[in-house]
Amino acid sequence: MGELEIATVAAADDAWVGAPTGSQIVETAEFRIARLPERFPDPLQVQWVRSARPAATVLTEIVERATGFGLPETVVCVKPSAPADLDEALLARGAELVDTADVLAMPLPAEFRATDLPGLEVRWRTTPKIGRDANTVGIATFGGTRAPDVDVALQAASDRETVAAGFGGAVVAYLDDTPVAVAGLEVADDVARLWGGGVLEAHRGLGVYRALVATRLSYAAEHGATMALTKGRVSTSSPILRRLGFVSYGQERTYRLAL
């Protein structure tokens, strides 16, 4: 299993942007702003910046557009393809670095097996019950607020279609029928995008996270993906993912910026 080309991984990372149903998007040739529904912990996001102009100049325009949403702050994602001086421009405006993640990738198919943990079952989010469990575990691990029942049902219906079609969805891990972890997968072209993996604190270190990865990699390979791509926080999930065979191809930094 050889390594991937850095340019290939960078291009796949640049293409990985999205927003849930109900979001408002402002996108130009130089930046993309997403206003997510209020229940999300960071509802205003600058998802990428790509420009040959000085970063301070572009950032001024971004702040003007973002301020129009009427929120007190935004988070800004600095991808490997961002201007080299974007970090400096953000810090000059008083932004706070809140997260650093490795951009991690792995060729598929991969020889990868889950830990044999008695009582563990991983289920796709294809029913309202599993959808509610995914929402509950997600709030406990990542923050946010309880989603309305109608939204949970609609998401489960959507996942039934995307899972069957080979595009992925969310999975929930259960230990003895108790939901303890959640994670997501999107298969786009030949790239498996692994997102949102979180395990309840009381159940960490047992192999649950590994099972979430194994389930998603197996599904992705079966549906034609040749690369797995994910983001791992340098202080938490990245070391685990590296031990599982992922390789870092750069970093993404997230800043919180007052508007």
Image (cartoon, rainbow, N blue to C red):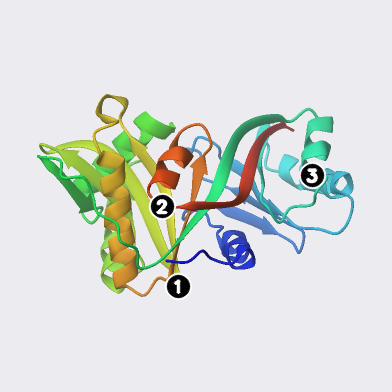
Type of the residue with mark 3: Leu
Give the percent coordinates (x, y) of residue 33.
66, 51
Q: Residue furthest top?
A: 202
Residue beneath the point at 36% across and 38% down:
198
Query: From the viewer's perspective, is residue 175 above or below residue 19?
Result: above
Q: CA distance from mark 1 to mark 2?
A: 19 Å
Sequence-first tag of 2 and 3: 3
Q: Residue furthest front?
A: 2
> Toward the viewer: 131 or 148?
131
Type of the residue with mark 1: Asp
- Is the C-beta separation of discs 2 and 3 under 8 Å? no
Give the percent coordinates (x, y) of residue 186.
41, 61
Q: Within 10 Å of the Cα at label 3, are there few (<14), some (14-19), or many (20+) other Cα atoms?
A: many
Q: CA distance from mark 3 to mark 1?
A: 30 Å
Sequence-first tag of 3 and 1: 3
Q: Within 10 Å of the Cα at label 1, are there few (<14), some (14-19), or many (20+) other Cα atoms?
A: some
Question: Mark 1 — residue?
Answer: 190
Q: Quadrant of residue 138?
A: top left
Question: Mark 2 — residue?
Answer: 245
Is 161 placed left or right of 48 in the picture?
left
Residue beneath the point at 23% across and 56% down:
126
Is disc 1 placed on a helix, strand or loop? loop
> Toward the viewer: 202 or 168?
202
Query: From the viewer's perspective, is residue 73 above or below residue 3?
Result: above
Sequence-first tag of 1 and 2: 1
- Is the C-beta separation of discs 3 and 1 under 8 Å? no
Type of the residue with mark 2: Gly
Residue beneath the point at 46% across and 33% down:
236
Question: Mark 3 — residue?
Answer: 86
Residue beneath the point at 32% across and 40% down:
135
Q: Within 10 Å of the Cα at label 2, are there few (<14), some (14-19), or many (20+) other Cα atoms?
A: some
